[in-house]
Image (cartoon, rainbow, N blue to C red):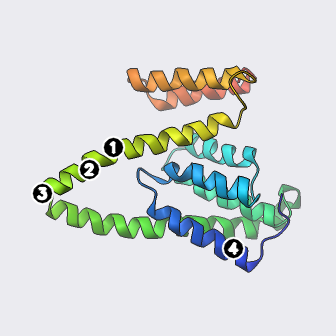
């Protein structure tokens, strides 16, 4: 795990998140596989557990799913300050990570979304606009599926640790075939985790 980040590292983090922002079709959560590759596998700025818990906490909390980016930024900053063992001394870098990551992921996509929404609303009857909207559906579904795969794969192969995979399959089917609210499924998953079953 990292013990510090240079100004160049912070710049690289911001530019990476600026680029990811423009790829966040369907929300910031769809960029999670690329964030995982960059932050966990390539840069080693986060552990698998920190990345996964950032997503899990943000999804369990009320509010937009982009909150996981704030938690990722917090963890990067705290790690750069020497880790959680540093206590309050790590908070300034943690807050810096939150501000930089959230600003970088929100600014380009928000600007582009406002401009595109205004244009799309003016031209909503054009065939190209309708086709674009319909064509984006499979892209968003595929990006969300790859995010789920990254989160499930962090628990090992299904033959090694079958319970999280089974839970993932069951929740996927329930989301697809029923109208059970996601908060109920999150609650059940939290209880199963608390009991140590997954």
CA distance separating discs 1 and 3: 18 Å
Q: Which mark is residue 133?
A: 2
User: In the drawing, what numbered circle is on residue 10?
Assistant: 4
State the separation of the CA atoms marked 2 and 4: 35 Å
- The residue positioned 71% from the left and 33% from the top of the image is 155
Q: Which residue is mark 1?
A: 137
Percent x, y for residue 3? 85, 65
The reply to whether residue 65 is in sight is: no
User: Which quarter of the figure has residue 196?
Assistant: top right
Mark-to-mark CA distance, 2 and 3:
11 Å
Residues tagged 2 and 1 counted as in contact (Cβ below 8 A) = yes
Residue designated by label 3: 126
Residue 148 x, y percent position in the rendering: 56, 37
Mark 3 closeness class: few <14, some 14–19, many ≥20 residues within 10 Å: few
Element under disc 1: helix
Q: Position of residue 17 (x, y in %)?
A: 56, 65
The reply to whether callout 1 and callout 3 are in contact (CB within 8 Å) is no
In this rendering, the label closer to the viewer, 2 or 4:
2
Residue 42, quarter of picture? bottom right
Going from the N terminus, do you reach mark 2 or mark 3 first?
3
Label 1 neighbour load within 10 Å: few <14, some 14-19, many 20+: few
**Horizontal arrangement in the rendering, residue 103 relative to residue 57 (left or right):** left
Could you tell me residue 187's position as x and y percent? 58, 28
């Amino acid at each position: 795990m990292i013990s510090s980040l240079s100004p160049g590292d912070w710049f690289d983090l911001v530019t990476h998140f600026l680029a990811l922002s423009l790829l966040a079709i369907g929300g910031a959560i769809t960029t999670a596989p690329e964030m995982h590759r960059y932050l966990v596998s390539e840069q080693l700025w986060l552990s698998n557990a920190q990345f996964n818990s950032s997503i899990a906490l943000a999804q369990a909390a009320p509010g937009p799913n982009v909150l996981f980016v704030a938690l990722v930024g917090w963890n990067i900053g705290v790690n750069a300050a020497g880790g959680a063992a540093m206590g309050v001394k790590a908070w300034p870098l943690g807050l810096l990570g939150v501000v930089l990551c959230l600003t970088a992921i929100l600014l380009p996509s928000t600007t582009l979304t406002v401009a595109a929404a205004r244009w799309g609303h003016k031209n909503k009857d054009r065939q190209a606009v309708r086709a674009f909207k319909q064509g984006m559906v499979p892209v968003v579904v595929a990006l969300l599926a790859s995010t789920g795969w990254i989160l499930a794969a962090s628990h090992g192969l299904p033959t090694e640790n079958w319970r999280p995979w089974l839970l993932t399959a069951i929740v996927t089917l329930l989301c697809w075939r029923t109208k059970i609210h996601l908060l109920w499924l999150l609650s059940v998953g939290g209880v199963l985790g608390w009991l140590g079953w997954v």
